[in-house]
Amino acid sequence: MTALAPRDLLILAVLADGPSHGYGIIKAVEDRSEHDVLLDPANLYRCLRRMSADGWIDEVEARTGDDRRRTYRITAKGRAILRHEARRLESLLRGLRPSLAGQKR
């Protein structure tokens, strides 16, 4: 499996905390990335369509009564991908820490 783009990783992480609509995802990604990852709506919805087609997320009925608002949730496959990517990044960081501390392995 190839590494996830930061935006994909953050979108899955946001949805792992619970279903959300587009604007909520955009704001949560900005907050989690400390404004390093900024999503415009067109880019976000392209990502969401791709993730949905790949089975990582699915759309749920909006419970707010606003039929225009699409709400998304992570699937079991999406959670597995998120866990895999988190383990991959943690392993990578473990290998970097000695170098960052000025130590040889």
Image (cartoon, rainbow, N blue to C red):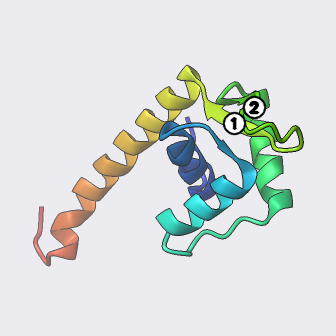
Depth order, front residue of 37/3: 37
Depth order, front residue of 23/34: 23
Depth order, front residue of 88/27: 27
Whichever of callouts 2 and 1 sits on the residue coming sooner in the sequence is 2
> In the rendered picture of this protein, how many numbered marks are placed on residues?
2
The disc label shown at residue 52, or none: 2
Residue 97 rendering spot, x and y as whole percentages: 20, 65
Secondary structure beneath dot 1 equals strand
Question: Which residue, given by chain and number where applicable, does mark 1 sit on?
Answer: 72
Of badges 2 and 1, nearer the viewer stands: 1
Residue 21 rendering spot, x and y as whole percentages: 71, 46
> Quadrant of residue 100 in the image?
bottom left
Amino acid at pointer 1: Tyr
Question: Does 104 appear above or below 43?
Answer: below
Residue 32 rendering spot, x and y as whole percentages: 48, 63
77 lies left or right of 58: left
